[in-house]
Image (cartoon, rainbow, N blue to C red):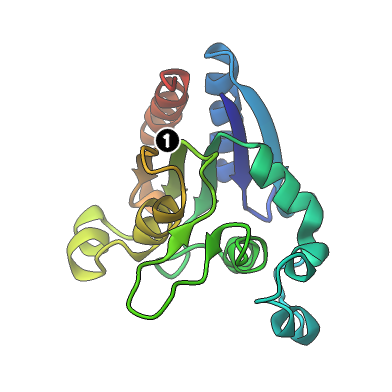
Amino acid sequence: MRLLVVHCHPDPQSFGAAVRDRVLAGASRAGHEVDLMDLHAEGFDPVMSCEERRGYHTPVENERPVAAHIARLRAAEGLIFVYPTWWYGQPAMLKGWLDRVFVPGVAFEMPLPGQPIRGGLKNIRLVGAISTLGSPWWWWTFAMRAPGRRILLTGVRAICNPRARTFWLALHGMDSATDAQRTRFLDRVEARVAKLS
């Protein structure tokens, strides 16, 4: 499978970078072709300009500012997001990537009145997300209702292939996790990705 791994963390020596590396190791073990998109390392600009917003609904024109990213998205069969959860959602850079790259005519078609959104990413057969969170599992799940997870595994998945599979891996209580807990999580990440088919 051709996997687009979208990594978002500003610190190249972070635990998030270790998670990314274990995703790549698992994908390699399984024989997947990987395109690593490291948003910070690539200097992606998450800010949508006024001109870009005005052209947002115009097919082809809306692709020009992020054409290289759209080409990589269209070439993928699976999407794996690797990022820290900050304030219950994706970091600003990753949210900006979704805002700017998942445009009408590419990721979806604008719905007609009273109809559901029509997905445009039929090439995507897998959506996975791997994140670290400071909050405990019970708070994230019951009080906050897992907003970051829902954005990717419900929202993004809805515009992908109708048979697209999903997975979510999370390390809660990241700020107080022991070395042993972190190591177990890294092992779990690599094993999960290595099982992808």
172 displayed left or right of 49:
left
The amino acid sitting under disc 1 is Arg
Q: Quadrant of residue 6?
A: top right
Tell me the quarter of the image containing the C terminus. top left
Residue 146 seen in the current view: yes
Tally of marks = 1
Give x and y (percent) for residue 185.
39, 32
Q: Residue at x 63, y 53 (%)?
A: 9
Q: Is residue 121 above or below residue 145?
A: above
Tag 1 residue: 182
Give x and y (percent) for residue 148.
40, 61
Q: Residue at x 82, y 64 (%)?
A: 64
Q: Residue at x 77, y 60 (%)?
A: 66
Give x and y (percent) for residue 68.
80, 51
Q: Quadrant of residue 103?
A: bottom right
Q: Residue at x 34, y 65 (%)?
A: 147
Judge by depth and name the residue closer to the eye, 90 or 99.
99
42 displayed left or right of 79:
right
Tell me the quarter of the image containing the N terminus. top right
* Mark 1: secondary structure: helix
User: Callout 1: few (<14), some (14-19), or many (20+) C-alpha neighbours within 10 Å?
Assistant: some
